[in-house]
Every structure is written in C-alpha cells, then in structure tokens.
Amino acid sequence: SQFIKQPHSAPSFAGVAPQGALVATRDKLVVPGGRSVPAVFDRATGKLDYFELNAGGKGTGGSFVAATDERFYVHTRDKGTRAFNLETGLKTAFMPNEPVLYDGHVYTAEDDHVRCYDASDKLVWEVAADGTGDLILCGDELIAAGKDAISFIRLPHNDSPAAVSRTIAVE
C-alpha cells in the first residue's frame, strides 16, 4: 500500500489491486486494476516500474489490457481505449476502440468503420463495417460484431485491398 493521490484527487492509502488478465511483454508485466490505470513491473526483477492510480483520471482504467513492446492499451467498453507509453506510463492521444494488435498494426472499430493503423498511428486503410460490439482477428480475416450484423473483413493481400467478404445479419 502506498500513500498516493486517488482519482477524486484526495491522497489516501492504496495499492495495486489486480482486476483482469495480466499481460506480459518481452520486458514488462502489465497488471490491470479495474477502474485504475494498470501497474507495470519489470519482468526480470519483479520491481514495480510505476503505478499512478490517478494517471488517466476517472473512466480511463479497465480490466482488459493489450500490449506491444512499446505501448499498452486499456479498454473501457463504450468509452474507447486509451494507449499508454509502456516505458513511461504516460497516456498518449491515440484512442482506438476494440483494438486488435497484430504484426505492428492496430485494428480498431470506430464510427461504423474498421480501421488499420501502423505503429506511428497513421491510418493504413479503412472499411465500412460496424465492429463496435467486438473485433476479432482470425487468420487473414477480421470478424466485426456490430449492432445488426457480423462482418467478415478480408485483410489486404498482394494487390487486393481490405474488403468485407460477407455479412451475417443478427438481432
């Protein structure tokens, strides 16, 4: 327990309270804390690198975390996902929704579009499809669960751009 500033800006005793699946990168262990921003530990030594309970303010924590060796992404359903610098713990301006991390890309579902960003947050491609319910990578397709349909999006291959290959209507 540490004497630290709480999300309501009052100092109090608190500490890392794991809530959600732990995420391991090559060098770090990211421990989600529910409503707080995750704590990050050094995997080799077990030493706490940082834990700033109030770092993201209210509403930017979450029990679902995904990570690359450069960033971690804290997902708060219906509020989007905030990207944080893994080395420093500082939040970035990048806010993807339903992020899927693969091969240096971030796939995200935003505003009735599924988008692909590169490591520098540059938009690589986008396809009109609702994936706000969830987004899953399966082989060479993204499966986008939306309000009224599940869309299967074929990833770009050779000279073919990303495209919706089929949809299934759902209630």
Image (cartoon, helix red, strand yellow):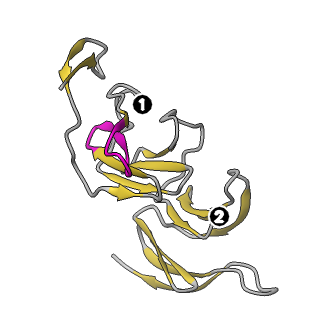
Which residue sits at x=28%, y=38%? Answer: 35
Q: Nearer the viewer, residue 23 or 54?
A: 23
Where, quadrant-wise, is the C terminus in this rendering? Answer: bottom left
Instruction: Give x and y (percent) for residue 132.
Output: 45, 61
Q: Give amino acid for label 2.
A: Cys
Q: Is residue 40 magenta?
A: yes
Q: Which residue is nearer to you in this view: 26 or 32? A: 26
Q: Residues within 10 Å of mark 2 (few under 14, many from 20)?
A: many
1 vs 2, front mark? 1
**Residue wearing tag 1:** 56
Q: Dot 1: within a 10 Å radius of its alpha carbon, few (fewer than 14), some, or many (20 or more) residues?
A: some
Is residue 90 covered in magenta? no
Name the spot of residue 4 as percent of width and height, x first.
27, 18
- Is residue 76 in sight in this rendering? no
- Relative side of 130 to 125, left or right: left
The residue drawn where x is 55% and y is 61% is 108
Q: CA distance from mark 1 to mark 2?
A: 25 Å
- Give the residue type that dot 1 points to: Gly
In percent of width and height, residue 104 lies at 63, 64
Report the span colored magenta: 33-48
* Residue visible at 46% across and 53% down in the picture: 27
Q: Quadrant of residue 125?
A: bottom right
Mark 2 lies on residue: 116
Q: Is residue 165 visible?
A: yes
Looking at the picture, does residue 65 appear above or below residue 148? above
User: In this rendering, would 2 be left or right of 155?
Assistant: left
Mark 1 residue element? loop
Q: Which one is earlier in the sequence, the residue at label 1 or at label 2?
A: 1
